[in-house]
Image: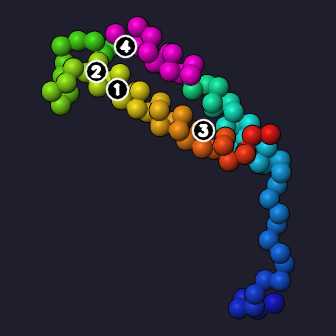
Amino acid sequence: MSADAPASEPAPAADPGAARQRARQLQDRALVLPLLAVFLFMPPCIRLFAGPQALFGLPVIVVYVFGVWCLLVFAAFRLSRGLARGEAP
């Protein structure tokens, strides 16, 4: 068979086991995300950033709280899009 000849074999079908595994991973991540949020907003974690320091003229604790909040919202958005596509079993 020459390198210029088109392949006559059809592309392999998508593995249903892989799709099921991906859906399960998304569900697991969706379960862990709120737990991560609770951990990141617990007083011991927030106190790490409480202090007189400023970043861009804002207290570091404010940057931390809103930065973590934005990242959690973005992660929830991405997870919801994946779960809404019907990847859940």
Mark count: 4
Which residue occupies 71% across, 91% down? Answer: 4
9 left or right of 32? right
First in residue order: circle 3 vs circle 2: 2
Instruction: Name the residue tied to disc 1.
Output: 66
Q: Indicate the amino acid at tag 1.
A: Phe
Question: How many angstroms separate mark 1 from mark 4 (CA)?
Answer: 12 Å
57 left or right of 26? left
* SS type, badge 3: helix
- The percent coordinates of residue 71 (x first, y second) are 44, 33
Q: Indicate the amino acid at tag 3.
A: Ser
* SS type, badge 4: helix
Image marks 3 and 2: residues in contact by CB distance under 8 Å = no
Which residue occupies 60% across, 44% down? Answer: 81
Q: Nearer the viewer, mark 1 or mark 3?
A: 3
The part of the chain drawn in magenta is 34-47
Image marks 3 and 4: residues in contact by CB distance under 8 Å = no
Instruction: Name the residue tied to disc 3.
Output: 80
Q: Quadrant of residue 45?
A: top left
- The percent coordinates of residue 82 (x first, y second) are 63, 44
Q: Nearer the viewer, residue 72 or 43?
A: 72
- The percent coordinates of residue 18 (x first, y second) are 78, 48
The answer to if 46 sits in the magenta stretch is yes
